[in-house]
Image (cartoon, grey):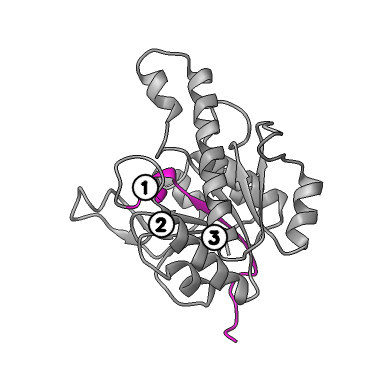
Amino acid sequence: MPELRYRKVLLKLSGEALLGDQQFGIDDKMVDRVAGEIGDALNLGVRVALVTGGGNIFRGMTIAGKGGNRVAGDHMGMLATVMNSLALQEGLSRRGIPAHVFSAVPVPTICETFTQQRAKEVFNEGSVLVFAGGTGNPFFTTDSGAALRAAEMGCDALFKGTNVDGIYSADPKKDPNATRFERLTHADVLAKGLEVMDAAAVALARDNRIPLIVFSIRQPGAFVDILKGAGRATIVADS
């Protein structure tokens, strides 16, 4: 058994990560692969919680960008994360992995409303936690929701699955001269204005001494490789 770098983690996925090769919606093949990798992590003895965005279905900023009500748009985006969370729960259940959805936005006929005490109880029983609804408040991103839940659950690290293998000085798909960072501090991310997560999420992780691990969710097996001390990622930590 390899020596694990982290034993209790929160994995943040963008809604776009669930698109797979599609233009809209949820790709079952991508959900199944993510579920499989979470199962592999559990087999190593790692406890895993999940937060997903909703951009594959709806972005609140879309309404705001057209001059509409930002609050209503954000509420719609929160509901999109509930749909993604249910899809992930089903993907895990198909593999025999116990998973429990908690939503910051009360939708009691669909899933349980989040409370820290109840979520910790379920986490300690060995279930994968799937957190929906962001923070439950408009004007906050699901990145902030992920940092908040990681702090509340006492996670060792917050993993951010992106489309590239770490943090770069610019978008490497647009700028061939972009520099990749192997390691940064939370203060570096904030000072350089690196857009891997919003400032509120980075500051919350910093204040709670939670490392950020930024890696490519497009690379099969990367999540588990990093847990085992290998793989390719940018680590944001203050020590």
Q: Residue at the far front: name it.
A: 94
Can residue 235 be seen here?
A: no
Please name the amino acid that badge 3 sits on.
Ala
Which stretch did the figure color magenta?
1-20
Q: Residue at x 52, y 43 (%)?
A: 143
The secondary structure type at the circle numbered 2 is helix
User: In this figure, which residue is indicated by the disc labeled 3?
Assistant: 237
Please name the amino acid that badge 2 sits on.
Met
Q: Give x and y (percent) for residue 218.
A: 35, 60
Q: How crowded is mark 3: few (under 14 residues within 10 Å), some or many (20 or more)?
A: some
Which of the two discs, 3 and 1, labels the residue nearer the N terminus? 1
Left or right, 222 with reference to 102: left
The disc at residue 19 is 1
Q: Quadrant of residue 125?
A: bottom right
User: In this figure, which residue is indicated by the disc labeled 2?
Assistant: 30
Marks 3 & 1, CB-CB < 8 Å contact:
no
Q: Residue at the far left: name it.
A: 176
Marks 1 & 2, CB-CB < 8 Å contact:
yes
Left or right, 21 with reference to 113: left
